[in-house]
Each structure stands twice: as structure tokens, then as C-alpha cells.
Image (cartoon, helix red, strand yellow):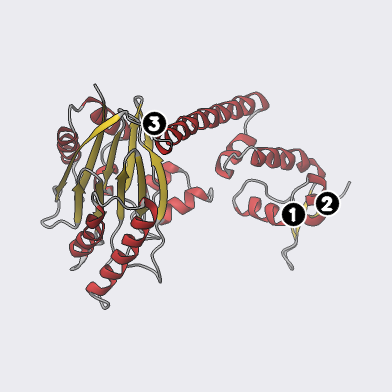
């Protein structure tokens, strides 16, 4: 059998030409030949098995970067990798089920397990800079971290972002709409600091109402949750290298050492309008939350973050130890972190 056009191959594989073009761009499934004059893609029927496998893996939700790896493995190893992926999905589904149960308890008025949030925040200029553009805040209902982009208005931008959220502290507001409005106002304030200099800042914050938390995030500051001994990253970095990883063009190791890893694709004060991630979460007794700037999370390994949060007797001890660990690791950038410990009733 001869080569198939992209349309014929798509029909045989039960995929779309658009999907095949994407798989080619990301190195998941390259065509057998490409016409040098018109760029038309052609496929061999021997590629159908791989194409159908890709389609089935996409149906179960596997990311393309992981599919590329699985498809290059021998059959037995590929089966093990698919099984491991589905185990992760199952564990995540179970975790979501627990969160849903907690949310139902809260909304039905049966959530009386939590009495107190303990909190602390700290900043440090690091070892290589005389000034600091990072800001952190912690209160009973709000914790926030912001990292101002370097320049004459970096610190002011970070401070303005957090100050815009402080009026929400203990105000009994509708969480998501309130924090979304506050971030919009913060974006306007940052832009007004100096239209010529175009200041910008990241912002990651948690706003609490009862056992519910609203998470807002823009930039590469991060939010972590320690629950049941496991540390989870609640945010995704809005950086250029992160987009390359998501598109399968770069792996995590390459991104971590890339010279452009700090380039932001989203920030307050940048672009035409602010685009922040918003999420609603349910607190469980014993949860420990950490917000930090990239000056900390890029030099303190994730296992050290987990161990420090787990072993600390209170939030102040946690943030102090994390700052100390970052400085011991060189701390070439400013540092900021804030922590919440959700205590159980005795």
C-alpha cells in the first residue's frame, strides 16, 4: 500500500488532520514524508498502530509529553507506564472526592472541625542583593506573596498588589468574586504607579471564609499544600519555559536550568489586561499551606519544603527555617514566604 494523505490517514486512525499536525509539531507522530513544494504531509499505513495508540491515550487524558515517551517504549514497559499513570489519576480522583465531601459538610452546616488558623510571613533580600522587591503578608483570613519585577517600582508594585487584598481580611465576603475584583483593582494600581516604566508583579494569595479558601494566582510565585504527609503544588508557573514544557517542547529538567526560566507570560501590570487563575478549595483539619516567591522555591528542593512544613511546630518556625535554608543554598534572589497551619479541635 502506498502513502496516505493526511486526510485519508486521519480517517483510518480515527483522528483529525488538526490533531495529526499538532502531533507532528510536538514530535509525537511525524509523517512518513512531506512534499517539499507544498508542505503536504503523507503517512505510511505502518504508522496506524502508533496513531491509534496515541488516540486512545488522549482519550484517558494522558498529556502529550507523556504520550511521546510511552509510545517509544517496548510494549511491556509501555503497559507499566500506562498503569502508573492511571494509578496517579485514581489517587487524584480520590483526593478530589475527599475535598468534595468536605465542601458538602461545610455548605450543609455540618463542618465544625476547625477552630483556628495560625499564620506567619517573612521576607529576606537574599545574599546577592541590597534591595528587596518581594513582599509577604499573613493574617487570620488572608495570606499573600508578591514578587515585583526588578526596577524602580518593583517593590511598590508588589506592595500595592497585597495592599489591594488586605481590606478583604475578615470581611465576610463572597470569596471568588471579591478576590477577583481586588486583583483587578490591584492591576490598575500597579499600572498607575508609572505608565512609562511599566512596573509589574506576581501575586499568589489565599482568602479564607470558614473552611473554604479562594486561591488567586498570577506569575511564578507558588502555593503548596501539605496534607497527610504529601506536598502538592496548587499553582502553575506563568512562565515561558512552563509553556514549552506543557507543549512538549522542553522537559522539566531543561526548564529548570534554562537561562530564560524567569521570563513571565503573565503578571499584574503586564499585557493589555490581567489574567489570573482562580480556584475554590476546602480546608481539612491538619492542612498546612505555604506561599513563596521563586527566590525560595528555585533553591530549596521540594523534599526540603515538605520536611520543613511537616516538622515545624508553628508557622513562624516554618518560614524562618525556609528562609535559612534558602540562604544556605546561596539565595541569589529576594525571598518571601507565608504559611498557614489549620489546627484541629482537641
* Residue nearer the viewer, 133 or 212: 212
Q: CA distance from mark 1 to mark 2?
A: 8 Å
Secondary structure at badge 2 equals loop
**Residue topped by disc 3:** 110
Give the secondary structure at mark 3.
loop
Mark nearer the viewer, 1 or 3: 3
Q: Position of residue 164 (x, y in %)?
A: 25, 61
Q: Residues within 10 Å of mark 3 (few under 14, many from 20)?
A: few
Q: CA separation, marks 3 and 2?
A: 64 Å
The quarter of the image holding the C terminus is top left
Mark with earlier residue (1, 2):
2
Quickly name the residue at label 2: 3
Q: Mark 1 or mark 3: which comes first in sequence? A: 1
Residue matched to label 1: 33
Q: Secondary structure under badge 1?
A: strand
User: Residue 87, image x and y in percent?
Assistant: 55, 26
> Mark 3 or 2, which is nearer the eye?
3
Amino acid at each position: 500500500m502506498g502513502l496516505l494523505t493526511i486526510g485519508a490517514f486521519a480517517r483510518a486512525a480515527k483522528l483529525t488532520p488538526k490533531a495529526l499536525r499538532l502531533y507532528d509539531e510536538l514530535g509525537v507522530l511525524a509523517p512518513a514524508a512531506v512534499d517539499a513544494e507544498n508542505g503536504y504531509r503523507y503517512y505510511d499505513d505502518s504508522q496506524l498502530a502508533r496513531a491509534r495508540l496515541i488516540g486512545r491515550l488522549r482519550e484517558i487524558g494522558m498529556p502529550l509529553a507523556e504520550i511521546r515517551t510511552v509510545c517509544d517504549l517496548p510494549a511491556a514497559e509501555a503497559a507499566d507506564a500506562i498503569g502508573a499513570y492511571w494509578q496517579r489519576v485514581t489517587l487524584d480522583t480520590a483526593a478530589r472526592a475527599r475535598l468534595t465531601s468536605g465542601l458538602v459538610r461545610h455548605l450543609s452546616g455540618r463542618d465544625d472541625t476547625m477552630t483556628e488558623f495560625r499564620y506567619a510571613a517573612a521576607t529576606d533580600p537574599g545574599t546577592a542583593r541590597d534591595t528587596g522587591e518581594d513582599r509577604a503578608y499573613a493574617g487570620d483570613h488572608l495570606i499573600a506573596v508578591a514578587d515585583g519585577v526588578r526596577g524602580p517600582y518593583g517593590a511598590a508594585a508588589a506592595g500595592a498588589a497585597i495592599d489591594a487584598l488586605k481590606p478583604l481580611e475578615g470581611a465576610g465576603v463572597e470569596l471568588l468574586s471579591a478576590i477577583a475584583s481586588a486583583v483587578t483593582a490591584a492591576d490598575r494600581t500597579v499600572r498607575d504607579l508609572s505608565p512609562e516604566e511599566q512596573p509589574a508583579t506576581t501575586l499568589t494569595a489565599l482568602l479564607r471564609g470558614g473552611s473554604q479558601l479562594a486561591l488567586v494566582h498570577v506569575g511564578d510565585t507558588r502555593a503548596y499544600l501539605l496534607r497527610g504527609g504529601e506536598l502538592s503544588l496548587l499553582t502553575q508557573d506563568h512562565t515561558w519555559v512552563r509553556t514549552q514544557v506543557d507543549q512538549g517542547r522542553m522537559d522539566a529538567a531543561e526548564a529548570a536550568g534554562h537561562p530564560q526560566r524567569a521570563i513571565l507570560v503573565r503578571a499584574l501590570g503586564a499585557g493589555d489586561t490581567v489574567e489570573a487563575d482562580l480556584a475554590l478549595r476546602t480546608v481539612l483539619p491538619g492542612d498546612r499551606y505555604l506561599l513563596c516567591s521563586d527566590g525560595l522555591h528555585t533553591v530549596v528542593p521540594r523534599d526540603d519544603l515538605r520536611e520543613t512544613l511537616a516538622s515545624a511546630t508553628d508557622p513562624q518556625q516554618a518560614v524562618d527555617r525556609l528562609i535559612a535554608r534558602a540562604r544556605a543554598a546561596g539565595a541569589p534572589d529576594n525571598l518571601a514566604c507565608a504559611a498557614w497551619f489549620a489546627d484541629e479541635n482537641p
